[in-house]
Amino acid sequence: MELTVAVVGPSSLVGAEILELLSTRQFPAGAVRLLGSLKTAGAEVEHAGRREKIELLGPGSFEEVDVAFFAAGPTVSGEHAEAATAAGATVIDVTSRFRLDPAVPLVVAEVNADAIGERTGRNIIASPSGTALALTVVLAPLAAAAGLRRVVVSTYQGAAGGGRRTLRRLSRETIELLNARGGRRQKPGVRPLAFNCVPEVGALLPGGATSHELQVVEETRKVLAEPDLALSVTAVRVPIFFGHALSVTLETEGPLGAARAMEILRAAPGVLLHDDFLTPADAVGTDATHVGRVRDDPVVENGLAFWLAFDGVRKGGALNALAIAEILLREYP
């Protein structure tokens, strides 16, 4: 059975990765439509060894499309996802547009694939942020074993998490500093990324949290089906181009311990346990959530601490979208 697939936003980092995975994972796509907004239509991207032009989104774009991946940003998803489902396509959205919509399932393939069957007539499935995705893959088996009382997370996010514009900005700032041209004035309120750490991913809100941090909390609760989970997140942009890492400390409801936690994580789907650890750069191009430095935290009862690293574009975005589509094909034909 060959499907007609649309990729909306194929020039974005995640969109380009989806195109690659469609080929490398041998997804049965008989035809792939490359669709974009006015900003990207007409540009060329590489697909299956060829350069192909991006078509402009418009009436008729989704006729006879079976699956539509949306990776062009929340505004485009909000404007065109309903048109895709009205034409009969199932939408898999990797943007933030529908993640917290109560009528749209938020799915991590290794954690709550059953939620795919709960999609309503809207026929939209959302994929969470990379932070929430990696976090839930690890928290879910630990929660099943001992329950979760409290979780505290600090993130170390490469520039790729902000898209191509943030990558270009880090590159430009790095070159300027290395050429002793660094000192140029930034826009008011904009802090430099190069050789710096900026704890401001998303808009800074009253109370001190950012929009991204609050969204990660709610996405994690939704995927785990634990609406009251005590979770605190501090998200930091670090001066690397690709890669994403989390430092996690937690308290479980019942006794667990590092040794038992490692046994559980060693068998957890999507998780690769290490005796030491992987850095964000080590994880680039890989398909797993890498866990290391698992240790007891003696400061609290039933305390545990560990380190996660993963590819935020591949594992944290495109791969989960493809996995959702594969489950759809296999279990909901």
Image (cartoon, rainbow, N blue to C red):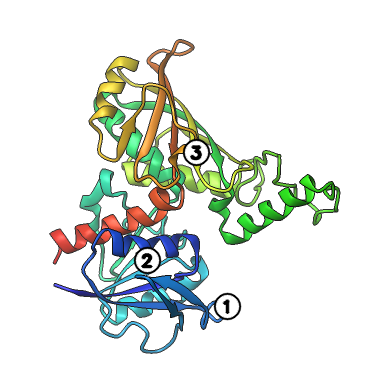
Question: Alpha-carbon neighbours of circle 1 within 10 Å: few (<14), some, or many (≥20)?
Answer: few
The image shows residue 53, relative to residue 49, as above or below, that is: below
Residue placed under numbered mark 2 in the picture: 19
The image shows residue 141, relative to residue 69, as above or below, that is: above
Mark 3: secondary structure? helix
The image shows residue 64, relative to residue 154, as above or below, that is: below
Residue placed under numbered mark 3 in the picture: 280
The image shows residue 137, relative to residue 5, as above or below, that is: above
Q: Which of the two residues, 235 or 276, is positioned nearer the viewer here?
A: 276
Dot 2 or dot 1, earlier in sequence: 2
Mark 1: secondary structure? loop
For the residue marked with disc 1, what is the amino acid? Answer: Lys
Q: Position of residue 300 (x, y in %)?
A: 45, 13
Q: Which mark is residue 39?
A: 1
Q: Outermost residue, top direction?
A: 298
For the residue marked with disc 2, what is the amino acid? Answer: Leu
Work out how far the residue at label 2 is from the one at label 1, CA to CA, in angstroms: 19 Å
Q: Residue at x 33, y 58 (%)?
A: 321
Q: Position of residue 152 (x, y in %)?
A: 49, 29
